[in-house]
Amino acid sequence: MTAPASPHDRYVQGIRINLGQFIWQAVQVMFVGLVIGMERNVLPVVASADFGVPKTSFLYLMSFVISFGVVKGALNFIAGRLSERIGRKTVLVLGWLAALPIPLLIYFAPNWWWIVAANLFLGINQGFAWSMTVTSKVDITRPEQRGLATGINEFAGYAAVGLAGIVTGYLSHLYGPRAALLGFALVVIALGLVTAILFVHETLPWARAESHRHATDQHTGPKPRFARGLSDHPTARQVFLFVSFQHPTFSALCGAGVANKVADTLLWVLFPLYLHQQGLSLVQIGWVTGVYGLVWGASQLWTGPLSDRIGRKKPVVAGLWLLGAGIAGVMLAHGIAAWLLAAAAMGVGMALLYPNLIAAVADISHPNWRSSSLGTYRYWRDTGYALGALALGLIAQAKGDMAPAFWFTAALLVLSGGWVLLRAEETHPRLPPRRRPEAVRASM
């Protein structure tokens, strides 16, 4: 049998040829989604009764999301850069090890600050583990499959978020919030860690092989329009500044990422609290918030592939505006049926924008610094948790009412959609962007 012409020839991109690893990465992100999803229904509602958080102290309540967002945002960037040196799998396993203290801190917490501390570890887990599932899928798939790949990834993660909200709502009703979260989290974290060690392969060689094919003109398929302005091996600082501020499309995508996490913060903390104030039970709240997560997750199975056909930009803009409309609808409607409908609309909006922002960033990032680029985008996106928690907490605190926070978020999403529409170029390699003179030079 003839030996491969190059060691890089072993690492062929494509979902079908790498299906086994693709599935295991989806299983990993499902476990990661279950860990964060367990908090979304239970903790905001029981914060007052179990941890002494005053019902009108919105900023204090938001503190656990602020800690999560600050840590996760920073760790996203660190994970991206670190994985280019020590590999994706090692960073993934480190993320699972960081999750081990979370259920114990919640179970034994004497006050709310223990929950804040638990969310520091949750931020590390999410920043390392979820980041690596996205990066690994992009490594092993072809450029024209990235919408599908990120759609499946985020489907698995956010369907698990919604499912965890429903399951922990029932378990809390049966066994109490702390015991329910302890048992649920320990099982999920153990499964995530063991399967990561035993079944997940390192995907960094696929990224290096892709870089080699581009360098030697052996790349086949649509030619990517990598963003120009960086060297082949830029420093972390150069990538961060370029993606954050210097490149118009990257910066618009980062801004949209911040806006969508401000919205998710609202739906994580204030939405269940608002529903509780309207008289819904913990189980009913679990269903409403669960529908949001499940629709978000399931819809990504078609919104990701949709962007492979029509481009990334249109779904992103439509998603931002639909999410804003759904949030406004919560304030305009009343009753569990109306809130379920609004939750479904918000889920579809998130599905349109969420995986396609990731795919768009990956489209124009060179494989040598793609993980750092994705880490920078995810830094800004998930720092949106902290910024959103701070802003929404202050708004609700100042007014003594949650309604202004909902309206602020809806307006932010509408403005962000307009900014992407005006500022960002289409990134899909098969589709021509709306051309400006500077954009032509940047993409040549």
Image (cartoon, grey):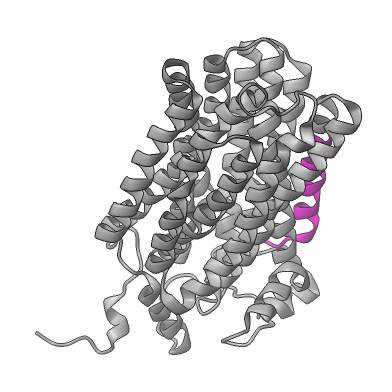
Residue at the outermost front position? 110
At 44% from the left and 19% from the top, the residue drawn is: 170
Residue at the outermost left position? 1
In the image, taking residue 1 as reference, residue 248 lies left or right, namely right
**Residue 58: quarter of image:** top right
Q: Position of residue 81 (x, y in %)?
A: 55, 73
- The stretch in magenta equals 408-429
At 25% from the left and 89% from the top, the residue drawn is: 5
Q: Is residue 115 magenta?
A: no
Residue at the outermost right position? 398
**Residue 171: quarter of image:** top left
Q: How many marks?
A: 0
Q: Is residue 412 magenta?
A: yes
The chief SS type of the magenta part is helix
In the image, taking residue 238 as reference, residue 103 lies left or right, namely left
In the image, taking residue 279 as reference, residue 359 lies left or right, namely left
Give the camera-side residue of 133 and 356. 133
Give the camera-side residue of 341 and 408. 408
At 44% from the left and 66% from the top, the residue drawn is: 91
Q: Position of residue 428 (x, y in %)?
A: 57, 62
